[in-house]
Image (spheres, helix red, strand yellow):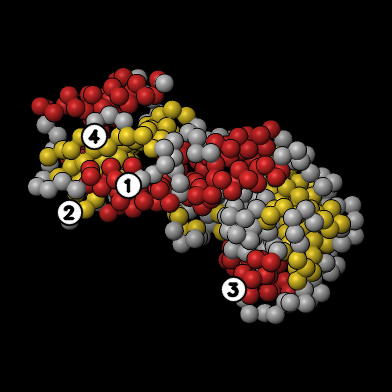
Amino acid sequence: MNNTYEISPNIYWVGGNDRRIERFENMFPLTNGVSYNSYLIMDEKTALLDTVDSAISAEYLENITQVLKGRDLDYLVINHMEPDHCANIEEILRRYPGVNVIGNAKTFQFFNQYYSMDMSENFLEVKEGHEISLGEHTLRFYMAPMVHWPEVMVTYETSKGILFSADAFGAFGALSGNIFADELEYDSYYLDEARRYYTNIVGRFGNQVQALFKKLEGLDINMICSLHGHIWRGDMISFILDKYDKWSKYLPEKKGVVLAYASMYGNTENAVNALASKLAQRGVKDMRVYDVSKTHPSYIISDIFKYSNVVFASPTYNMQLYFPMDALIRELSVLNINNRKVSLIGNHTWASAALKQMTELVSNMKNMDIIGTPIDINSSLREDREHELDELADIIYQSLQE
Ligand code: FEO
């Protein structure tokens, strides 16, 4: 049974969901799967925008067959050459051998690196601002390098003002019948997954996202169709643009504290719980406390993008920073997180390394201010040092008032 959705007259969503997938890119846990979106425009010419992951090929190909109703496919636009969107290109070429495959020079380079089919006769290379008319609909192409890969481009349909945005504005989570973000209580569950998707997948490339925004300035955009997640229209367009603007500028969405700790026997955890309690008693609300050994870093990273302050607390292990904490901070560094206030707590029994290494890692990141005097616990925090925790709580609280 096909499953398609006419999102605008003669423009169809022909993608699908994968709820069985455990991890996106074999790295990021998915509790509610992911959607792979593809769109088919029916006009004097027919145009398919991107394909989908191999996990849902059968349903996808049935969708296309149903919408085309025996017509040929004239164009396949490849906005992004990552395999979660490209796994069906060869099959599309086999089924529609005359199809013109639209991309840029890098698109075709990457295709030839991944796949063995010779499609040199089908290549149709486009450059910035090129347009292709399908009849009533016209496609205009904008290059969007590094949003998320170097070959990425976005396609703007000029008659309806629809932006086919590749990975940009995407989200984790399968679609549950409602294909438009305005049909959901997006701000609760779905926004967290959109943030986790952006920060972990595209987070490193904030400058490139801003560059794309500049290119699109002045365009009349009525709908944004990403390759993952829901479609944006109406008021939800400014909603997600505002989020993307903050995320890509590394600006926190709200003042608040994420406390991420590593703890082998509960002593570092105890200090963090005590600090969180002291912060709460000073009036700090909506804190997030995470055990880095328990919670996948993608969730912690997402919240560190959301909030203004972070506390890292970790023991020394084998004369190093405890490895999951080391990995978390290094990943944050790779994702270019900046503009946060950071407080540090180390712990050791006979030789201190964790606090020193956390200090070095954070100091090497851009615009990450270490606030308060770092605390280096000796095995467990005793009452005679509680005043250090109080002083740190005061400093963090004050920073939230600025
Ligand atoms: Fe959904 Fe960058 O691929």
**What secondary structure is found at the residue carrying circle 4?**
loop
- Between disc 4 and disc 1, whose residue precedes? 1
**What secondary structure is found at the residue carrying circle 3?**
helix
**According to the image, label 1 marks what residue?**
361
Q: Residue at x 73, y 74 (%)?
A: 93
**According to the image, label 2 marks what residue?**
319
Cα distance, mark 4 to mark 1? Answer: 14 Å
Labels 2 and 3 touching (C-beta < 8 A): no
Q: Amino acid at mark 3?
A: Tyr
Query: Visible in this render: residue 386?
Result: yes
**Of the numbered discs in the image, which one, if any, rests on residue 374?**
4
Labels 1 and 2 touching (C-beta < 8 A): no
Q: Where is 356 relative to 72, above or below?
A: above
Cα distance, mark 1 to mark 2? Answer: 16 Å
Labels 4 and 1 touching (C-beta < 8 A): no
- Between disc 1 and disc 3, whose residue precedes? 3
Q: Where is 253 relative to 84, above or below?
A: above
- Between disc 4 and disc 2, whose residue precedes? 2
* Nearer to me, 156 or 227: 156
